[in-house]
Amino acid sequence: MTTFILSQTGFVSLFAIFATGAIGALLLSRSDAAANWWGNLFAIIGSLWGIALGAAALAGNQTLSYSTTPILSPLPALDFSIDNLSALFILLISSIALLASVYALEYVKHFYGRYSIGALGFFYNLFIASMLLVVTASNAIVFLMVWELMSLTSYFLVIYDRAEKKNTQAGLQYFAMMQLGTIFVAGAFILLYHFTGSFDFDAMRATAFQIPTLWQGVIFFAALIGFGIKSGIVPLHIWLPDAHPAAPSHVSALMSGVMIKTGIYMLIRVLVDFFPMPPLWWGVVVLAVGAISSVLGVLYALTEHNLKRLLAYHSIENIGIILLGLGSALMFSSLSMPALAALALAASLFHTINHATFKSLLFLGAGSVISKTHTDNIEEYGGLAHRMPQTALFFLVGSMAISALPPFNGFFSEWLTFQSLFAGINSGVSSLTVSAFLLAAGALALTGGLALACFVKAFGVTFLARPRSPHAEHAKESGFFMQVGMGTLALSTLALGIFSGKVAGILQTISASFFAPVDAPALVAHTAALSVQHGFASVSGVALFALIAIALFITFVASTYGVYRRQRVVLGRTWDCGAPLTPRMELTATGFSRTIIMIFKRVLRPQLHVAATYAEGNTYAPISRTAEFSVTDIFREYLYQPAAALTLKVSELIKQIQSGNINAYFLYTFLALIGILCMTLI
């Protein structure tokens, strides 16, 4: 069976499953229930097949190549390959897609009768397939084709809930940014083709190091911008906080959990795989981008009161943490420290996996809350732990994981990233290099503290205290399939934490293959701090995982079936100084985060707008007052809005050349031909 899965027939069968799911869902559009079950069941089957393929390829520790003849002869041969890095991402994408699809069996029902469920299933299956194609493509032309397919299918998923104008605007902004990114990605590959003479990744890998230093720098920036837009790095993140909340929640989980990681995958492929000895400044730039993205991402998350936008900003933060590991790996590689480079890249890959797990869990939890309360405003929640106890438990686990609290997975990958940065600080290579690592470590520490504060706000205001609106008052728990998706991810965050030593060992083997040669004793010496993690992977680790899992299961069953309610419970009023308790007495999300926002006011630029309503003829005693506290998106105000205004002005000027005179158009054609001729002669 393993041989068949790894064969070319097995590889093609994987995508045939998703194609069957996509086409079948579209054909069954007349029945919402049939389209939902068909589309998601084939997505589940395809995801299981992808898990088997990724696991088998990873266990085999070999590179597999596939080539198919295109239907149309002018097109290039469709070349794909799977190495250990590709296998890891196949496994990651398929695992998250599996649980998102199980969740969707129940979640998609609240779209019945509003939009075409068949269209949702069509684009959803193609979206998953396109992500798998992206991480297996081994030819630049083929890669650009499937990269665009991924952008196009995700665009239609972003605008699926098109009744709200903000969703269509978010989709348009997303698509425009993706096309801008594709221009830079294509530019990087064109330059690689110019100097290597081939679009094949193997040829680029073999000869890219011979490219002149200046052009290597151009390729670096083109790749960083192009793939950085997809990943959502600052300041190229402008699309992410709008697009992720607009999509259905199971799609948001895939976009935030794994789609943006395809940009990370390609950054590793180009910057690490194609250029084994990069200049030192490459690593410094990536490290700086990571530090800025992590800090600003979590700061803007603290200001948000839209639950899904808050989670979207945390994706920017965690991409920054991933880049801290990648930047460290590039720096160590340029300093001829392959063991430390392997350690840093392993930390980056580990946090990639961990973020995919807990962020998908949190987005599914947010979808559960929003689908039952019909609002995404945190200020209108409250008391949901009593009405949605399972969702509250799963969201709490995700909040602890993303806040890097042990024994959940987020702690161990951030800790491994700290180890990489501390190793750079202790390397003593130069004062500037040490300073870069020191500042990055400080940024990571600040990010961790702010993330913890943000999720105290997110969980506390959403699930604790009393309901603040009728939406929260009448909320009910989500269905079985939604709970299965969230519960499995919650257990996965625990398993990845307890068995982090085993996971880190596998990732170090993958990362070490990019840095030659890595001396085994040196790698062990640099990763001695992982002994605690390896201890967790022993028999005691299994016992600990079983104990915590049983405790979570008992809590789940008790909250579901009311075991606690059989006990005699006496309810009494909280002492309130004689005043009736109301939701107005609760701490709001705005009040919780205001102090932190004011500390960083020079960056966030908060604004307070106060308005008062007066009775007719009375301008002294207001009937009511309202206060609105907001922050300024400095990138939107000072970078994107001026750029958009300039583009409109230039467009107006260019439009004037369309005079409608056929003679003028002939003149333009003649001048263009002269220009091309001159370029050819040069």
Image (cartoon, helix red, strand yellow):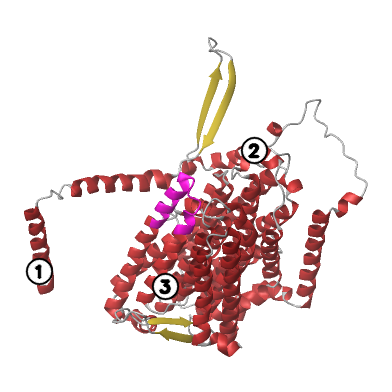
Residue 39's quadrant in the figure?
Answer: bottom right
Mark 3 residue type: Leu
- The kind of secondary structure element at disc 1 is helix
Q: Is residue 344 visible?
A: yes
Q: Is residue 173 magenta-colored? A: yes
Residue pointed to by mark 3? 271
Span colored in magenta: 156-175
| Residue 503 point in image, percent of width and height | 64, 75
| Residue 166 point in image, percent of width and height | 46, 45
Of marks 2 and 3, which one's residue comes earlier in the chain? 3
Q: Nearer the viewer, residue 194 or 427?
A: 194
Specify whether 189 is left or right of 664: right
Of marks 3 and 1, which one's residue comes earlier in the chain? 3
Residue pointed to by mark 2? 588
Q: Is residue 77 magenta-colored? A: no
Does 566 sit above or below residue 507?
above
Q: CA distance from mark 1 to mark 2?
A: 67 Å
Mark 2 residue type: Thr
| Residue 304 point in image, percent of width and height | 55, 45
User: What mark, if any, has residue 678 been given in the picture?
Assistant: 1
- Residue at position x 36%, y 64% in the image: 182
| Residue 333 point in image, percent of width and height | 46, 75
